Image (cartoon, rainbow, N blue to C red):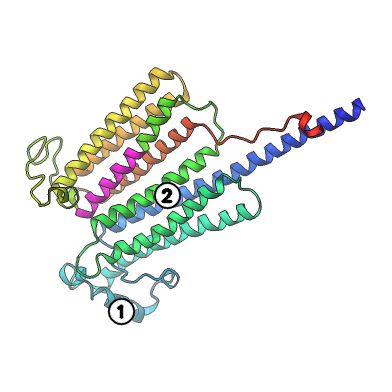
């Protein structure tokens, strides 16, 4: 009887170990997949920024989620696409006389942006279906990943909503819609990073409550700063007042609230929007540095403290890139670097926050007695 009990105990332990090894292997596969999604999302946001900087976003005047995958083929189709573009205000008031070759340049930027957006959908949805149907997804991951997928679908609709704002009465897209489109893209990026980092092995436990809360608020502050940056891009506010630290000759320039009602200046006055974006950068920098100081005091020598220092350094670097971009009047390369750095800062802040909260817990192995009796 004793020998039988020992055999059952050994079998139960082996089964529990095998189950955990399988779970860890599945987590690793899902994590690598999500890291791949993050790379495609990063490329998508950069191409979106390039599309904006080259003023290519209105070159495709229709939304064809399926048929639009195929670009124009042959002279006749190119002329047809060009004729549609010639009907919108951007061509008639800004680009009148543009050649077909020049149109093709802006068309390919927008087409590439839309193709990448569609690719993200496939890169996310198809592996998600595979992992789900093959039983490799833990139950708590399913609503999280479905939520990200739903955000991706919403983002596609918001993208067309943004483009449509520039097809009738405007020569560009609405800054409100552009900022919304950018912020949702960053929300998708942040959510994907949080899930992926939660699946990674953690060398230490969760951080103290204060560290976790502060890290979470930093993520929110970064997302808000990115939204302000979207307003700046939508209004081309970075093309004006290209001095620092003074703006229009003063630390606090005049004419910030000349439009009525006053609140509208925060969204439609280029000077006010740029000034608020500058203030947001200062506040974010102070928060990141203070967070690092607090974590160093509370948890000296810990991985959480080291990550907080690196995050503060990334914010400092991003601020420096932003200043250089402004002083150089938003050159293409530095503008893209500034946008890419914003994603790097956001991604690292999310990873830091998730690590401070600890990894997703592993299911406890059942006690041997429970297995036997």
Q: Residue 31 carries which label?
A: none
Q: Which residue is drawn at 30% across and 38% down?
A: 318
Residue at the farthest front position: 373
- Start-end of magenta stretch: 220-235
Residue 151: % across, % down: 43, 54
Secondary structure beneath dot 1 equals helix
Nearer the N terminus, badge 1 or badge 2?
A: 1
Badge 2 density bin: few <14, some 14–19, many ≥20, Cα 10 Å: many
Task: Check the picture and name the quadrant holding the N terminus.
Answer: top right
Residue under label 1, please give it: 79
Q: For residue 214, what is the image quadrant?
A: top left
* In this rendering, position of residue 139 left or right of residue 276: right
Q: For residue 154, what is the image quadrant?
A: bottom left
Quick one: 326 or 31, which is closer to the camera? 31
Q: Is 72 a magenta residue?
A: no
Residue under label 2, please give it: 188
């Amino acid at each position: 009887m004793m020998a039988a009990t020992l055999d059952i105990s050994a079998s139960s332990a082996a089964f529990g170990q095998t189950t955990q090894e399988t779970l860890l292997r599945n987590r690793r596969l899902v994590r690598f997949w999500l890291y791949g999604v993050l790379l495609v999302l990063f490329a998508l946001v950069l191409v979106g920024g390039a599309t904006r900087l080259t003023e290519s976003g209105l070159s495709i005047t229709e939304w064809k989620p399926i048929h639009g995958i195929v670009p124009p083929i042959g002279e006749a189709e190119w002329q047809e696409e060009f004729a549609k573009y010639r009907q919108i205000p951007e061509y008639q008031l800004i680009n009148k006389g543009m050649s077909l070759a020049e149109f093709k340049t802006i068309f390919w930027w927008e087409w590439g942006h839309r193709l990448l957006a569609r690719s993200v959908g496939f890169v996310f949805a198809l592996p998600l279906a595979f992992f789900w149907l093959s039983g490799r997804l833990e139950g708590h991951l399913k609503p999280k990943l479905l939520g990200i997928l739903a955000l991706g679908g919403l983002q596609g609709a918001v993208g067309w909503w943004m483009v449509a704002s520039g097809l009738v009465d405007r020569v560009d897209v609405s800054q409100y819609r552009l900022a919304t489109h950018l912020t949702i893209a960053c929300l998708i990026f942040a959510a994907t990073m949080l899930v992926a980092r939660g699946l990674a092995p953690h060398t230490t436990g969760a951080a103290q409550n204060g560290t976790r809360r502060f890290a979470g608020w930093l993520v929110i502050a970064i997302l808000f700063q990115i939204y302000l940056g979207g307003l700046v891009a939508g209004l081309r506010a970075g093309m004006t007042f290209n001095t620092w630290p003074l703006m229009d000759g003063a630390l606090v320039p005049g004419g910030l609230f000349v439009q009525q009602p006053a609140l509208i200046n925060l969204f439609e006055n280029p000077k006010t929007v740029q000034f608020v974006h500058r203030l947001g950068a200062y506040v974010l920098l102070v928060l990141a540095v203070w967070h690092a100081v607090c974590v160093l005091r509370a948890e000296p020598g810990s991985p959480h403290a080291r990550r907080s220092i690196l995050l503060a350094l990334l914010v400092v670097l991003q601020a420096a890139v932003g200043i250089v971009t402004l002083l150089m009047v938003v050159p293409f390369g530095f503008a893209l670097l500034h946008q890419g750095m914003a994603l790097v800062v956001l991604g690292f802040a999310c990873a830091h926050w998730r690590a401070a909260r600890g990894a997703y817990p592993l299911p406890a192995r059942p006690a041997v007695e429970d297995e036997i009796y």
